[in-house]
Amino acid sequence: MLAEQFVTAATTARSYSRLDEISRLLWRAHAENALADDAAQTVAEALQARRLALRGGRPREALKLTTARRRPVSPDKAASIARRRRLAASGAVPCQIAAQFTVSELSALTVVAREVQRRGRCELHLDALAAMAGTCRTVVQTALRTARALGHVTVTERRRAGQRSLTNVVQIIAPEWRAWLRLGGVGSELKTPRINHLFSVGTPRICSLSVHASHDMVAPRKDTKSCRTQTPPPP
């Protein structure tokens, strides 16, 4: 009678929590010799069958594969590679530090450096860093781990009990790197000389670039009256 009650409860259960409760009661009764081994095995098989029915008939391994988090994949691999190389060559990291990392790792550190220069610290998610750097999540983790081991950055975890953890906080502590960022090592563009366009009546006149010439490069002044070049008197 007890085994039949367990089987009926197992076949009519509508949730996993109910099945877990029946399983606990089953093995407690078995431990107290209220159920024989064969009867306990029959109830256990009924519980397993009900679990599969609630799961839609899929085995546990297939369920894990379908519910696993899929890592982001770049839609344009060629554009990601070009962006990765461009960031690595942008000069966001001093050469003495950049020589310790690969091109992919350097692109990730460049994104971190730009965020630090903009906000004082980097709180971006690893997937966001990987997407912006044109690389993958593993490379970003390796770059941050290596930079922290070498004393270039600090990585602070923000765990919350019972809740999803916040993103890590990355800060740059290397003195030469901080000084480089203060000098504008990130995103600095070459300043081109200003061109003044002078326009006369009728046709525009093309103006040359303004340069600072030294005293030796100054052409001799002409006399407006005689149209002759004035030369200094002999000593």
Image: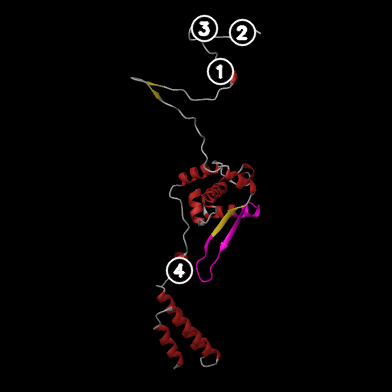
Label 4, label 1: how far apart the Cα atoms are: 83 Å
Label 2, label 4: how far apart the Cα atoms are: 100 Å
Q: Quadrant of the N terminus?
A: bottom left
Q: Nearer the viewer, mark 4 or mark 1?
A: 1
Task: Name the disc covering residue 218, or none.
Answer: 1
Region of the chain picked out in magenta, as a range: 144-167
Left or right, 110 with respect to 11, comes to right
Secondary structure type for disc 3: loop
**In the picture shown, does residue 159 fall above or below 22?**
above
Name the residue: 56% across, 22% down: 213
- Residue 24 is covered by the magenta coloring: no
Tags 1 and 3 in contact by the CB under 8 Å rule? no
Mark 4 residue type: Leu
Mark 3 crowdedness (10 Å alpha carbons): few <14, some 14-19, many ≥20: few
Instruction: Pick the residue in front: 48 or 97.
Output: 97
> Which residue is identified by label 3?
228
